[in-house]
Image (cartoon, rainbow, N blue to C red):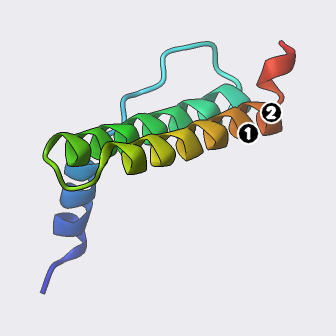
């Protein structure tokens, strides 16, 4: 049975987050978290495509969808108005 510490260690390994060092606002912090998640997912998709696990067209479509999500995040957080 996996205990909570092992689970957290695995999650931190698989989904690392870097401390935010920019101008602090709740919106900036939330966008930074969204951006890190975007980068992690794009990295996984690129690795899958590079290793022949998914075709380039599928990788492109998935990354394009993630890009639309990040653009929506900017809009929802009101960051495009600054």
Q: Residues within 10 Å of mark 2 (few under 14, many from 20)?
A: few
Q: Position of residue 75 (x, y in %)?
A: 80, 33
Q: Which residue is mark 2?
A: 75
Residue lying furthest right in this view?
81
Secondary structure of the residue carrying numbered label 2: helix
On the image, which quarter does residue 4 sit in? bottom left
At 58% across and 36% down in the image, what residue appears? 67
Up-down: is 72 above or below 28? below
Cα distance in 3D space between marks 1 and 2: 5 Å
Q: How many marks?
A: 2
Q: Position of residue 17 (x, y in %)?
A: 36, 37
Up-down: is 16 above or below 20? below
Viewport quadrant of the N terminus: bottom left
Up-down: is 21 above or below 5? above
Left/right placement of residue 35 relative to residue 11 reads right
Q: Residues within 10 Å of mark 1 (few under 14, many from 20)?
A: few
Q: Which residue is mark 1?
A: 72
On the image, which quarter does residue 72 sit in? top right
On the image, which quarter does residue 64 sit in? top right
At 36% across and 40% down in the image, what residue appears? 40
At 62% across and 32% down in the image, what residue appears? 31
Q: Position of residue 35 (x, y in %)?
A: 52, 33
At 16% across and 66% down in the image, what residue appears? 6
Q: Are marks 1 and 2 in contact (CB under 8 Å)?
A: yes
Q: Position of residue 13 (x, y in %)?
A: 20, 48
- The residue lying toward the viewer, choosing from 43 and 31, is 43
């Amino acid at each position: 049975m996996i205990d909570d510490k092992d689970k957290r260690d695995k999650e931190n390994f698989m989904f690392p987050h870097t401390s935010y060092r920019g101008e602090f606002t709740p919106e900036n912090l939330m966008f930074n978290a969204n951006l890190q998640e975007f980068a992690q997912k794009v990295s996984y998709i690129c690795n899958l495509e590079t290793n022949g696990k998914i075709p380039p067209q599928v990788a492109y479509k998935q990354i394009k969808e993630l890009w639309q999500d990040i653009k929506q995040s900017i809009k929802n957080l009101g960051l495009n108005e600054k």
